[in-house]
Amino acid sequence: MTRLVADVLIDTLEALGVSQIFGVAGDSLNGITEAIRRKPDMRWVHTRHEEVAAFAAGAAAVVTDGLAVCAGSCGPGNLHLINGLFDCQRNHVPVLAIAAHIPSGEIGSDYFQETHPQILFKECSVYCELVATPEQLPRMLGTAIQAALTHKGVAVLVLSGDVALSAATDVPDPVWPRQAKPRVLPAVAELEHMAALLNEGKNITLLCGAGCAGAHDEVVKLAEALQAPVVHALRGKEYIEYDNPYDVGMTGLIGFASGYYAMESCDTLLVLGSSFPYRQFYPQDAKVIQVDLAGERLGLRHPLALGVVGDVGQTIRALLPALKARGDRTHLDRALTHYAKTREELDELAVGHPGRKPIHPQYLAQRVSELAAFDAIFTADVGTPTLWAARYLKMNGQRRLIGSFNHGSMANALAQALGAKAAAPHRQVVALCGDGGLTMLMGDLITAVQEKLPVKIVVFNNGALGFVELEMKAAGFLETATELVNPDFGAVVTAMGLYGQRVEDPADLDAALERAFAHDGPALIDVVTNRQELAMPPKVTFSQARGFSLYVARAILDGRAGEVLELSRTNLWR
């Protein structure tokens, strides 16, 4: 049998350990799907929407810490990948996207389904090129893979269907390294300068992000040496929060008051592997030092006293010997006391009284955390599910938390759960879905059945775009265009072939979750949660307080006094 370009592509991916490709089949992908069909150890994961395929590939890359692959057919097919690929790019995960193209001889003729993928995907990729001839494929494929792995981003190969079905040239397959992991350290002079600034500081706080992955123990040792509280950004939660006696919670719009005040009260802030975006939460008068592998992120959010390029763990190990011993714990103890009080107040909101409906979302998130597996992988939809996950899911060094935390796209949780489960079939995967996010890409619930992916889906069903409503109230607007008329999701998914149940009473919640988690197949629990739940940010500005007061006045004048009363009942009387 003649070896085709598509065979070279799939053979190369298989040699690199890729065992599955997420996508929706189409005629311009025929060569590739046929090459996969002939591979007993290669799987085409058939999603119902290409956006889901891209999100799923991104989650698979997170779980495996390796290359993941998705594909879309020409024109609209690969165009649907773009939102998920933006998320992959901004989450810094290595993904190869195969964007099939129209017949090569028709490019530039306004042909049926013609687009320009090289232009469309340029912004969300580290490599994006058109394979014009069979001779180009081996080298371009290798370059794309290496770019994705080296830069931890998206590489796009644009490949016409007729080129994929062309005979491969007699060119040896390139041998490319999978992931180079160099030792990256700041210069000696920079380390000395950093140590001097830290030795001068009296009240030091650490802000830790996703760049602290693999450096948990080093961060704890540094916090001990500096007697410094440790604040984490959302993407740092899974790496920093657990087994950390210096942790004082998260900061940001959905963070903890204790995290905010630990940063606000410091005179020196050390930012480790984080590009935390909200400038209003940085201390105004503190010296800020930043360590990051990406030099372009240094000083991006706040003026720096010092910015250095380096791996967080390696940098801390080199820095520790130069730090002076210190015994003053005043700043640390104050921050820890504040955190204990904040944590107690948050836990007091996570209550469920039998017969008292609807269910508080804090209680739902807390029960999911308690009942889920020790090494569960959680995905969370953007909006209130992410908020409750950030505040109530407990990390332990084995659990993972995946979301659209940088790109902020709706409808990510189900798609990422499918990818995580495909990549880690022996681990429990729990998707925390909002009712808005779930219904946006609801068709891929069928993917869980068809592809035998036993994900567990928990729906925070409050009948609204909840976070949007919170933002409207804080700005003084009446809720508009946010209400969702939802079905009984438990009944809907039962018809699709999943296990489904609807829960309205807190008394029924634990048993329902336990049944879903134990079910040998995909399962969904539709939990009716309180629409009027407020989620207070760690810092309430004057404009927010004024805006909320204006909202209350407008609601009463608009005849919505009942809503205001329910808001008070929900948030003042548990």
Image (spheres, rainbow, N blue to C red):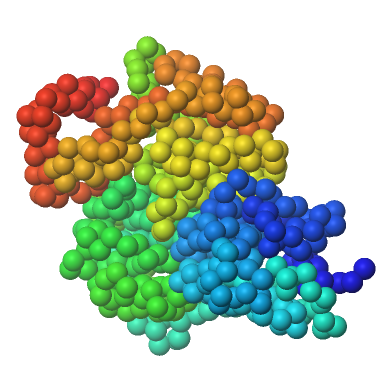
Residue 203 left/right relative to 319: left
Relative to 126, is 526 above or below? above
Please give the count of numbered marks on the rendered protein.
0
Closest to the observer, 128 or 365: 128
The part of the image, by quadrant, that contains residue 562 is: top left
Instruction: Point out residue 210 in the picture as x, y percentages from the top left corner.
Output: 46, 60
Relative to 394, is 325 above or below? below
Residue 570 left/right relative to 295: left
**Quarter the C terminus occupies:** top left
Write the residue at 73% across / 74% down: 163
Instruction: Point out residue 244 in the picture as x, y percentages from the top left corner.
Output: 45, 51
Instruction: Point out residue 360 in the picture as x, y percentages from the top left corner.
Output: 35, 27
Closest to the observer, 20 or 261: 20
Write the residue at 45% across / 75% down: 294
Instruction: Point out residue 573 in the picture as x, y percentages from the top left corner.
Output: 22, 22
Instruction: Kindly tell me whether residue 55 is visible in this rendering.
Output: no
**Quarter the N terminus occupies:** bottom right
Closest to the observer, 421 or 242: 421
Instruction: Kindly tell me whether residue 310 is visible in this rendering.
Output: yes
Write the residue at 53% across / 79% down: 184
Write the residue at 58% across / 58% down: 77
